[in-house]
Image (cartoon, rainbow, N blue to C red):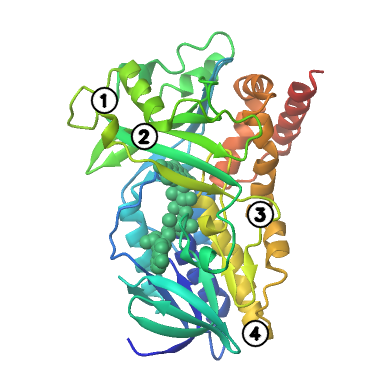
Amino acid sequence: MSTSDVDVIIAGGGPSGCATALFLWAETRMLARPPRVLLLDKAEFPREKICAGALGGRADRALASIGVEVRCPGADVRGLGVVTGAGELAARHPRPIGRVVRRREFDAAFLDEVRARGIEVRTGIALEGYTRTSRGVRVATSAGELTARVLVGADGVGSRVRRAMGLPRGALYAQAVEIDTPWCEADDALGRTAEGVSSRRWRAASQARDVLWFDLRDRRYPGYGWSFPTIVGGESLVCRGVYRMTHGVSALDDSGPDVSRLLADELTRLGVGNGPNGKTAVDLTTFKRFAERGLAAHEPTAQESVMLVGEAAGIDPVLGEGLAQAILSGKAAGPYLAQALVRGDVTFRDWPREFARSRVGLDLALRRRALPFVYGSARPRMESLVTRSESLARAGLHYFAGEHVPRGALVRATLDGVRALTGI
Ligand SMILES: Cc1cc2nc3c(=O)[nH]c(=O)nc-3n(C[C@H](O)[C@H](O)[C@H](O)COP(=O)(O)OP(=O)(O)OC[C@H]3O[C@@H](n4cnc5c(N)ncnc54)[C@H](O)[C@@H]3O)c2cc1C
């Protein structure tokens, strides 16, 4: 590849890179001279990305606002359920509130949406580093050098851009491990075992196979197990996994069980095999752990000519939810970048403040604040709250879907929260 000049290089063609490219395109397409954008990814697509694939409807709604629809197979999600030592509660909506996708399919379809709008995409090219120049950045790639006014690091948890910026890897870290298995009897039993903590109306919801279940019963570690419906090659399966914070929770006991052992124990308890067609013995060596980075307060996410989006910057540390956050961080970054380019000011000094004011920035800040309550000493009170407050569950459903949260549910959920945490 010869040296070429573009306005923006986006390193990473996952959800945050695609969303940044598309929201920037939407903001600038009417300009006489829209910015020239190059999106590059080290992988060839379709590519695998280990992820449970639960995608809140709010991300699809955000994309629909600029006329983008990412079409791929998936399982509809209509409900959210939580099971803790204090009981269980599931809430369900008549309409889908989101979907569970396979990242191999979703990300390839997303990238096609970028290409379809005339944005240049080059795959199989890895960013290796960059240096700042008087006119922007000189980017070293596996296929040669490129220059641009701006570099966007959308290259995920192992971000090369972040490292080249000289930033620490992040204060909030978690590990996650997952596997797809057939449905089992215990899945249908969820929601039937509640002991007086959920009303019959809500309990019935949990027996459906379109609910995202979060299991916080095991207090030995700061994290949770999940079971999400998923479609693999046309077959309905359950994606099961464990998310465990490893850094960033003060009461952290690192000697606790590791994620692979926790998942293996759960599979044994459920009596399900190690894979859809599978063996019955649980083989720990087949599990690979993957890291997730939470967005920590006061960590820089930009320098002159360079900014980070998606998991390169950080996602929700409480649940490790990163797909909607990645897409919504692209929604915040696109218009911001458009303005910066038009103004000719790419210092990005105000990007952290602008991001913090965006909806996704506020969401992430709130979740970060909730971290000590969810996994710290207030955990029993939090468990009691999430399994008793139907208003909170209802508000959560609407929020996940990206729908207006009814004021009544919001007020009652807030009151329930205050009562639970203050013990009044
Ligand atoms: C086990 C597991 C389960 C998860 N389940 C969920 C879930 O159910 N729901 C949810 O919301 N989130 C989930 N997450 C989190 C979610 O997967 C991520 O937060 C999300 O993918 C972040 O999107 P991104 O675009 O920022 O980064 P990524 O999706 O990681 O995309 C980064 C892209 O950058 C490319 N890249 C990397 N390095 C370079 C380089 N040097 N040069 C060029 N390209 C590069 C990669 O090939 C990749 O395509 C899960 C994570 C894990 C580990």
Residue at coordinates 65% horizontally, 79% vertically from top-left?
346
Q: Residues within 10 Å of mark 1 (few under 14, many from 20)?
A: many
Q: Which of marks 4 and 1 is nearer the N terminus?
A: 1
**Is residue 54 in view?**
no
Q: Nearer the viewer, mark 4 or mark 1?
A: 1
Label 3 vs label 2, nearer the camera: 3
Considering only vertical position in the picture, is 240 above or below 219? below
Q: Which of marks 2 and 4 is nearer the N terminus?
A: 2
Q: Name the residue under label 2.
A: 229
Tag on residue 361? 3
The amino acid marked with disc number 2 is Pro
Report the Cα–Cα distance between label 1 and label 2.
21 Å
Residue 411 vs 334, above or below: the answer is above
Q: What residue type is labelled 4?
A: Val
Separation (CA) of disc 2 from disc 4: 45 Å
Residue 342's mark? Answer: 4
Real-space Cα distance between discs 3 and 2?
Answer: 28 Å
Return the residue nearer the eye: 320 or 99. 320
Mark 3 and 2 residues: CB-CB less than 8 Å, in contact? no
The residue tagged 1 is 282
